[in-house]
Amino acid sequence: MNEIRLKPKNLLIVIAISFLLIWWLFHNNRCVKDIDGANTSGLSHSNLPVIYAITPTYARPVQKAELTRLSHVIKLVPNIHWIIIEDASETTKLVKSLLVRAGLVSRSTLLNSKTPDDFKLKAKDPNWSKARGVEQRNAGLAWIRKNMTRDPSKHSIVFFMDDDNTYSLELFEEMAKIGRGKVGVWPVGLVGGLMVEKPVMGDGEIIGFNSAWRPERPFPIDMAGFGISGDLIMDYPEASFSYDAPRGYQESEILRHLTVVRDLQPLANNCREVLVWHTRTETPKLDAENKLKKDGQKASDDGMEV
C-alpha cells in the first residue's frame, strides 16, 4: 500500500480548511438554534422591558391571515405580552386556535369587548365615519391596570399594535429604549396621505409634526407611532379612548393625559427611520363565493377555517 505524504505547506492548508469547516458547522448550528428558539431579533429577556401589545380585532375574511402574520412577528420578540381583544360577545375558536398553533398561549391574553350598536360601522359606512377599536383598546388598558405589577424594578411599555400594519423587528429594539415616565415616538410610513408622517426635530427635541391631515390636532400622530411607559398608564387611570373624541383625535385623547409634545422621546435615529408602516389589506372580492351560496352549493371553505 502506498503511503500518502503531505508536504508541510499542504498540511497547513488541510488544517486551515478543517478549521473553517468546523467553524461553519458551529455557526450554522447556532443560527438554526436561534430560529428554533424564535429569537433572531437581537433582543433578549435581560435587555427588553415587557411590551404589552394591545391588538383590537374583529371577524372578517382576512382576520386569520392578518393575525397569523402578526403572530410571527411577536414570536420573534421575546418579551411581548400580546393582548388581543375581539369585538364580539365572546372569544372565538378561531383566535384561540391561532394562539395555540403559534405557541403564544403563555405570552398572550385573549379578551372580548363588543362595540355598542350605536357606534358600530354599518355595511355601507366609510371606514373613517366612526371610531374603531375604542371599546377594545380600553378593555386592554383595563386589563393592564388590573394585572401589571407595580414593581419599581420592573419596566414595561404599552403599545397599540393594530393587526393590519407592518412592523420591523427593529421597532421593538427602539421601543425598549423608552424611559420611565416617557412616551416614545417615531415615524410611520404610508399614512395620512404622505409617504411618511413623522415628528419634527429642533434643538434635540420634538417641536411638531409634519402631518398633512388635521395638523391642528394636539398630537397629529398615528396609533402605530408611539409607545407609552407602563408607569404612566398606572399613574393616570383617566387616560383612555373615547367615542366623544372628534374623528382622528383618538391618539390625542389618550396622550393629552400623559405628556406634552416637548417631552416626547424621539426614537428610530431621531425620527429619521421608518420601522412601521400603516398598511391595509385589500378587501377580498368574493363574488364567486356569493354565487355558490346563491345557487345553493356548499361554500368553498365548507368544513375549513380560512
Image (spheres, rainbow, N blue to C red):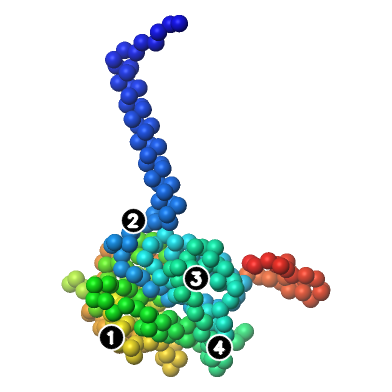
* Left or right: 263, with 62 as reference point: left
Residues under labels 4 and 3: Cα distance? 19 Å
* Mark 1 vs mark 4: in front: 1
Residue in the foreground of this view, choosing between 1 and 215: 1
Residue 164: mark: 3
Would you say residue 261 is visible in this rendering?
yes
The residue labelled by disc 1 is 235
Could you tell me how far apart the alpha carbons at marks 1 and 2 are, in whole angstroms?
A: 31 Å
Q: Residues within 10 Å of mark 2 (few under 14, many from 20)?
A: few
Judging from the image, what secondary structure is the residue with disc 1 in? helix
N-term-proximal mark, 4 vs 3: 4
Secondary element at tag 3: loop
- Looking at numbered disc 3 in the image, what kind of residue is underneath it? Asp
Classify 10 Å Cα crowding around label 4: few (below 14), some (14-19), many (20 and above): some
x and y, in percent, of residue 243 in the image? 45, 91
Q: Which secondary structure lies at badge 4?
A: loop
Choose the circle earlier in sequence order: 2 or 4. 2
Q: Nearer the viewer, residue 257 or 110?
A: 110
| Distance between the alpha carbons at the discs numbered 2 and 4 | 41 Å
**Residue tagged by mark 4?**
120
- Residue placed at 30% from the left, 21% from the top? 12
- Asked if marks 1 and 4 touch (Cβ < 8 Å), the reply is no
Q: Position of residue 280 (x, y in %)?
A: 51, 70
Residue annotated with mark 2: 42
